[in-house]
Image: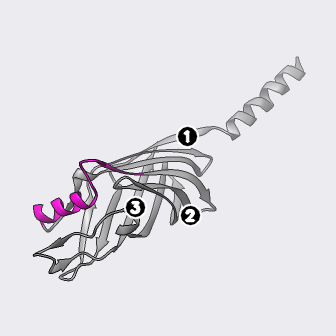
Amino acid sequence: MKKNILTLFLASITFAGFSQETYSLSSESTLTIDGTSTLHDWTVTANTMDGKLVAEGTAPKEIDFEVLVTDIKSERGATMDKKTHNALKMEDHPKVTFKLKEVKGSSSVVGTLNIAGAEKEVEIKTEMTNANGQLKIKGEKPIKLQDYGMEPPSAMFGQIVVGDDVVVKFDLVFTK
């Protein structure tokens, strides 16, 4: 009898040690894309994001994250929004996605980033914290538009051209 109780106790400790917790992306999360043009610097904001994170202990084991392209908006109005959506090939690829492959220490994630239908494996430097039922991941990733098959948008017959380099900045909050 004592042997059975000991076995059950050890098994429960083992399973508890490997338990996984699922988190959902909170509305507190933010994601912006900063870029330049021959006229001015600009920022667009992702207004609709969805994500799921599975953690083992304090470390993420799975992250599935997506941004709805139609809700990436600028403060400069509908014309810039339309050019952004066209550059992202919204009609054929309505979402930008990231799927985690691995976590390197506590300062970097590696995963598959899909933008405008082009998939690339990327490593992103991050700050990760886990407290009060929230797992936060903050970071930024420089991206070249042409690496993802996107042509930098232009306006006024090519007089205004967006730079090929942009920076994606994110502060993602996942809650239990």
Residue 36's x, y, as percent? 27, 78
Q: Earlier in the sequence, mark 2 or mark 1?
A: 1
Magenta span: 77-97
Q: CA distance from mark 1 to mark 3?
A: 20 Å
Residue 95 colored in magenta in the image: yes
Crowding around mark 1 (Cα neighbors within 10 Å: few <14, some 14 to 19, many 20+) is: some
Residue at mark 1: 21
Q: Earlier in the sequence, mark 3 or mark 2?
A: 2
Position of 45 with respect to 140 (left or right) is left
**Whether label 2 touches label 1, CB < 8 Å:** no
* Dot label at residue 108: 2
* Dot label at residue 60: none
Query: On the rendered image, what quadrant is the N terminus found in?
Result: top right
Residue at mark 3: 171
Q: Secondary structure at mark 1?
A: strand
**Near-viewer residue (28 or 157):** 157
- Identify which residue is drawn at 31% across, 49% down: 93
